[in-house]
Amino acid sequence: MDEKLKLMILTPERKIFNGEVKELSTESEIGRFEILPNHLDMTTSLVPTVTYFTTIDGRKLKLFTSTGVLKISNNKLNLLCETAEWPEEIDINRAEEAKKKAETILRKNQFRDYKKEELRLKRALARIKAAD
């Protein structure tokens, strides 16, 4: 049995990561989950979150990932997302502003924009957490 995973993280603009990892932890609409070697093949949608993974040499890395898709097949993980940012790339002031704006709109109960603002809030919170 294989004890490693091949992970590729892509956005429309760039390749974020391409290498071997021991594990990956990310989040779908039904909650956080972890992928270890020899996981069943599957495809799932992802929500804005902090994605964590451990490289083969033991480095524990994290980054913000926005909405996207994760495909798992034969120990190969392809994570495709709209945006991905390493902690040092995150503009924390911009994330805090987006968080405040989304919270204000959600408090006003503007249902027409509710889902959009809920997603904005999730992105902002995940960026803030990833930058920590």
Image (cartoon, rainbow, N blue to C red):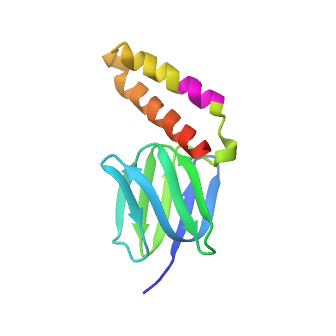
Foreground: 19 or 129?
129
Picture coordinates of residue 131 (x, y %)?
61, 43
* Vertical order, 76 against 93 (above or below): below
Tell me if residue 37 is in the magenta stretch. no
Name the residue located 56 percent from the left edge and 67 percent from the top edge: 54
68 in relation to 42, above or below: above
**Quadrant holding the C terminus:** top right
For the view shown, which residue lies furthest in the bottom direction? Answer: 1
Residue for point 52% across, 33% down: 124
Image quarter in which the N terminus is found: bottom left
Measured as percent of width and height from the top left, residue 10 is found at 57, 54
Along the viewing direction, whichever of 40 and 33 lies nearer the viewer: 33
Name the residue at the top extreme: 108
Which residues are drawn in magenta? 93-98
Q: Main secondary structure of the magenta part?
A: helix
The residue under the point 34% across, 64% down is: 42
Residue 46's spot in the image, x, y percent? 41, 49
Please provide percent x and percent y for residue 94: 62, 28
> Residue furthest toward the front?
132
The single residue placed furthest to the right in the displayed view is: 88
- Residue at image point 53% right, 62% down: 53
Name the side, left or right, on which 99 lies relative to 55.
left
